[in-house]
Image (cartoon, rainbow, N blue to C red):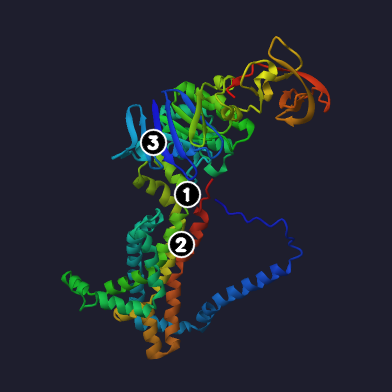
Amino acid sequence: MLSIQIEHPRRSFTVRVRLEVPEGRVYCLFGPSGAGKTTILSVTGGFELLQKGRIVLNGTLLAESQGSRRFHLPAWRRQLGYLAQSTHLFPHLDVARNIVFALPGNSMDDYTLGLIRTLELRDYLSAGANTLSGGQKQRVALARALAARPRALLLDEPFSALDQPARQEMQELLLRLQDEYRLTILLVTHQLTEAQRLAHTIGVLDEGEILQEAAPADLMTAPGSVKVALLAGYRAFLPAAVFGMGEGLVALHPDRVLPGSFPALGPVGRAQVESCFPYEGRWRLGLRMSQGPALEATVAHGEECRVGEEVSFTLLSPPVLAG
Amino acid sequence: MPFHRISNPNSSSREPSYGHILIAILAVCTAGFLLLPAVVLISRTGWPQLAADWQSWGAAPLVLSVATTSVAMVVLMGVGTPLAWRLSQDPGGFFRYVEYILVIPLLMPPLVIGLLLVYLYGPYSFFGHLLAIFGISGSNSFFAVVLAEVYEAAPYYVLAALAAFDGVDRALVHTSYSLGLPPGRTFFRVTLPLASPGLAVALSMAWARAIGAFGAVIVVAYYPHGLPVAIWVALQERGLGYALPLALILVLVSLPLPLLTVLWRKNHVVYPN
């Protein structure tokens, strides 16, 4: 169990978090850039001094700063693997020597060979670190971090510099490794898809505070506030009364607004198509209801899209938030 | 890693611009300016005189210069490298000012450096007395020559080594820490290998400065004669024709280390990924 309590002042706000990552689980801090995610990882990893709080890993105190009690275990004694967007492979070493960098005698053991097999690095062992593609570099960096047998892994937007196929491949590999080795992972990302795919628990972070902690599915179906809903991709918030759903605000996600009238699935409304634009291989419609509110809907590529046309839509079990 | 020159896609090699021509002229002029004294040295040195000089002086000045400079380099690497590394680690307090203090020997005329070294380490000084206990003389000795060379070359070595350590990506050092390597092992396995091309340049600059050191050396140690002092004595006593062959020997002896450094560095510079 990785237990983190941090109060760390930054220029414009104070990072104030309390979170726990159970052993063998993946906890994802999800939030926009500048929310304080990297600060949390940096303090946890021991690269910045803890200003106030306490960090404990499997019963071992890593850092504490409460009143007169101050303790800081150096980064090299924390047994925390760290992987960032920049792989930081040692440029003077080849792939094999990067991987065994932390191993006694720089020799490969069965565990490391297993990692190399799983990460499909056998063909690159003698290659220079600078000759690899972005995805290969990340695989080497991951193998190197895991070869040191960390008790937990800190991942700081590790795949955000990769293209979509490479990112998906890395996510799959990480899931496979996590499943195989029961890794305890604290992941930081600003990509919701990545958070949903990899995490057991997502902590939505904004301006240094965790707004909501939830399982990926729960975060989508029950965002706790407008701010969380916005970060989770909800684009419109209409009075619930418009759909006869009582008080509060109905949060509308474009992927959960279905063109057509299907009363059995949820509240139905009518709106005029105001705009139509391509969105990640599909089409996104800008709709405006007769009462004035605007919303968006996603439709499959190839479906007809006529600006000015009046269409029906169905809201698929939209969450209602307190107004 | 091979170094590839990338041609500018906006320029055409067939139609050089005035800017390119001007730069080419400036480059030729600068190269000529730097090379001409060496050409004069080679062309004006009488080879029979070189042999005669060698007969009359023997190998003693050459051996002394190479030996004192080698010892000075070992001392500099031993004390200058840790200092440069310490300065590169976000210096605070006292170390913040050491970098400024290092500039002082650069600004002082070598003659003044020599006078101050005599004042500090000469036979009548406190340190001179201290050295005498161990049978070491702070003037007119091998030790004195090494002392003067170290003092003159130290800022060149430390400042260049500092730049080399500054060039090592801190993230790589942090990565090594996260893999469980403490600072000492990280220094030898990450920082030092990555800084070594820059350290080699620092060493070759310090070597060139030390082996040619004259102003401070002649004040603290007129005897025994190293090559720079021998050149001065030959010029004073017998004229330019006798001094130039010794100068040629000095250049030939000084050259291999910087030259090897340049060649080695070209093959060992590693670029961050």
Residue at coordinates 75% horizontally, 27% vertically from top-left?
A292
Element under label 2?
A: helix
Q: Quadrant of residue A151?
A: top left
Query: Badge 3 is on which residue?
Result: A103
Kindly indicate whether the residues beneath marks 3 and 2 are on one polypeptide chain: no
Q: Amino acid at mark 1?
A: Asp
Question: Of discs 1 and 2, which sits in the foreground?
Answer: 1
Q: Which mark, residue B201?
A: 2
Would residue A164 be found to the left or right of residue B52 on screen? right
CA gap, disc 1 and disc 2: 19 Å
Residue at coordinates 35% horizontally, 43% vertically from top-left?
B182
Up the image or down, B23 lies above or below A297; here it is below
CB of mark 1 within 8 Å of CB of mark 3?
Answer: no
Q: Quadrant of residue B179?
A: top left
Q: Which mark, residue B169?
A: 1
Residue with the most extreme top position: A264
Q: Chain of mark 1?
A: B
Tell me, yes or no, if residue B58 can be seen here: no
Up the image or down, B241 lies above or below A251; here it is below
CA gap, disc 1 and disc 3: 22 Å
Give whichever of B189, B107 is nearer the camera: B107
x and y, in percent, of residue B272 in the image = 52, 48
Give whichever of A11, A174 is nearer the camera: A11
Give whichever of B137, A234 is nearer the camera: A234
Give the class, few, some or many, for how many residues have Cα within 10 Å of label 1's Cα (few <14, many ≥20). some
Residue at coordinates 18% horizontally, 74% vertically from top-left?
B129
Element under label 1?
A: loop
x and y, in percent, of residue A69 in the image = 29, 38
x and y, in percent, of residue A249 in the image = 63, 23
Q: Amino acid at mark 3?
A: Leu
Q: Amino acid at mark 2?
A: Val
Tell me, yes or no, if residue A295 can be seen here: yes
